[in-house]
Amino acid sequence: MEQIISRCGNLCSECPWSIYIRKKIAKEDWEDYSKEVKKYLGFKPVKYEWEGCVGCLTPNEELPKDPFYNFLKKCRTRKCGNYNEVNNCAYCGRFPCANTVASNNFTREKISEKIGSIIDDETYEGYIKMFDAMTNLKKIRSSLKDNEIKNPKTISKKTDIIKLKGEFKNKNYRRIYEKLIEIANSNLGIIGIDTISGYEQYLLRKDILWKFIWIFGLYGNIKDKELIIDSITLYENRKPVSLPKNEEEWKLYFDILTQFGIFSELEIKTNKLYTPTGYMRFKVPQTNKPAYIIKMKVNPNLQEPQFFKILNEITSELQITTGKRAFTYFKNLNFHSLLK
């Protein structure tokens, strides 16, 4: 069959999770095939009976109604490709950009290192190449003529911050509010925020960061000038967003906060931190103990007034005065209920 390439460079026509591969692998061979897939990719394809992914080139109106396909609708690279009318990232004038979901985690070299032996051509073609996205995209890019490469249409970042009229009940609230304004007005480390993929990346990062600030502000345990929050508390209060899934993602958010004088450290409490699907656990297996804790401090400029103590007062009062909508008020910096 004709090769089908996703917006981010995966080979849909060879993907173990796609509808296409089910036409190639006999049902009686599926179990052996899926075990081989897991050996190299780390994940086992879902049961054969499932219909499978139809690929990101499928228009929204033609996607199956199953909620599973929401991941395609939300994909920032898919949105960017659709908006700019390009087949995939290789055709974009900014390729490679920092905001694509294209991965370089499944190269022949990295998988060889992972399993401790050299990957031969047959194994690479059968189990790895379909997810070696950046390699696939670079190969496509090398074959394109200049007139086939298209610069993306740019967009403007929107910052929805409610302007306050009046003075805070507590004069110390002003300092914390101004620091939160700084964070809200930043690009959160996004390069290329003027593209659809960059802006979508910004929105995702913004939601996670503000939820993290809200949780540690409201539920963190303050000891002297340090705040400690555990993974169970984070997990139980994470909705409606997902927390970072690994140490690398946590570091990204820690690095953002460092720019604003807030320093974080991850302390792991178990040698079984990750689930088989690659996500950080929130509990130590077979216990009710947190799998990790986060310790936080601030620079001297934020120590007076005490940053964590005042942030706790702000989040607590917002929860009392605005109820279930408290987090929405917080992330929009709508602090009218805290004014005189």
Image (cartoon, grey):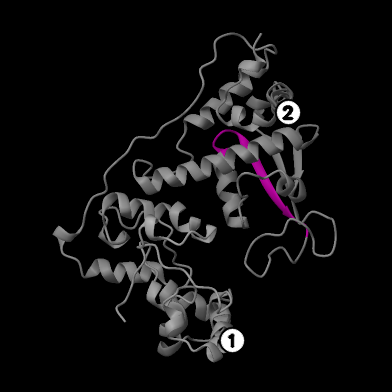
Q: For this view, does 305 lie left or right of residue 144? A: right
The quarter of the image holding the N terminus is bottom left
At x 14% / y 58%, what residue is drawn? 147
* 158 or 59, nearer to the observer: 59
The magenta-colored residue range is 257-269
Snapshot quadrant of residue 157 = top left
- Name the kind of residue labelled 2 in the image: Asn
The residue mark sitting in front, 1 or 2, is: 1
- Name the kind of residue labelled 1 in the image: Glu
* 145 or 44, nearer to the observer: 44
Q: For this view, does 320 lie left or right of residue 197? A: right
The kind of secondary structure element at disc 1 is: helix
Position of residue 317 relative to residue 71, above or below, is above
The quarter of the image holding the C terminus is top right
Q: Which residue is mark 2?
A: 312
The kind of secondary structure element at disc 2 is: helix
Distance in Å between CA atoms under marks 1 and 2: 52 Å
Position of residue 218 relative to residue 272, above or below, is above
Snapshot quadrant of residue 308 = top right
Position of residue 47 relative to residue 288, above or below, is below
